[in-house]
Image: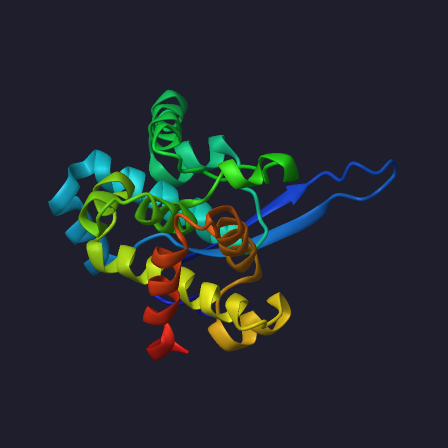
């Protein structure tokens, strides 16, 4: 019997495939349901509603990185213990700040406008927001936001060095899904106006490569 790490939860769901006659498949992912120390700090800083929003981003984000799309019913009722309307208000709140809560994979044409919270943190930083401001928007600790920015900086530096996306995962230990998001963001913001900021970003990643 496999014992899950403390605070982790395995979620399995049956997904019907679009192909006619195809058998439904079971998708599974491992998410952080409880982070005793971290959740306590978030609740102290942002209250119960803030902790709910923090967990919404964390759980859906971790599932998304494992290519599993959760349903709103499952997340609201079973995981967060809130109503569907409350969940949808939280989704709308994040959307107002340019943060995509991934209950489905967005169409390719819409990808650059729909960043999950890790990439959204880097985008907000590129737009001139401070780490503390971003932390308040995302209901995360400032240290976590610093980590998201460092991850993006690492991918910027690798991309600038000509490293392929396939090699990036081995070097950076960042998931394929997030590498794809970071590269989309890099292409969007790799402009003359923001090149200096990106260059500083890339140089700051040296020590983590």
In the displayed structure, 15 sits above or below 32; it is above
Is residue 95 at least partly visible in the picture? yes
Q: Nearer the viewer, residue 69 or 157?
A: 157
Nearer to me, 114 or 27:
114
Residue 155: x and y in percent read 47, 65
Residue 11 in view (yes/no): no
Q: Residue at x 53, y 56 (%)?
A: 183
**How far from the left and from the top, in percent, is residue 206?**
37, 76
Location of the C terminus by quadrant is bottom left
Point 44% across, 69% down: residue: 3
Q: Which residue sits at x=38%, y=25%?
A: 92
> Among all residues in the image, which is located at the extreme front?
192
User: In the rendered view, does 38 fall on the left or right side of 86?
Assistant: left
Image vertical order of residue 209 relative to residue 195, above or below: below
Residue 65 image position (x, y, % from top left)? 52, 54
Q: Residue furthest right?
A: 21
Residue drawn at point x = 45 percent, y = 44 percent? 116
Q: Is residue 119 left or right of residue 15?
A: left
């Amino acid at each position: 019997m496999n014992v899950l790490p403390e605070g982790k939860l395995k979620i399995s769901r049956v997904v019907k495939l679009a192909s006619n006659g195809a058998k439904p498949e079971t998708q599974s992912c491992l998410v952080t349901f409880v982070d005793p120390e971290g959740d306590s700090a978030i609740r102290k800083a942002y209250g119960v509603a803030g902790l709910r929003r923090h967990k919404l981003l964390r759980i859906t984000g971790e599932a998304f990185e494992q290519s599993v799309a959760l349903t709103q019913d499952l997340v609201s009722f079973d995981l967060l213990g809130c109503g569907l309307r409350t969940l949808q208000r939280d989704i709308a709140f994040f959307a107002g700040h340019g943060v995509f809560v991934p209950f489905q994979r967005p169409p390719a044409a819409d990808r650059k406008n729909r960043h999950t919270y890790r990439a959204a943190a880097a985008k907000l930083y590129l737009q001139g927001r401070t780490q503390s401001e971003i932390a308040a928007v995302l209901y995360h600790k400032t240290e976590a936001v610093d980590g998201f920015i460092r991850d993006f900086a690492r991918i910027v530096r690798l991309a600038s060095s000509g490293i392929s996306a396939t090699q990036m995962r081995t070097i950076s230990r960042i998931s394929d899904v997030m590498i794809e998001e970071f590269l989309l963001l890099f292409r969007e913001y790799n402009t003359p106006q923001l090149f200096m900021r990106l260059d500083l970003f890339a140089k700051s990643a040296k020590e983590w490569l």
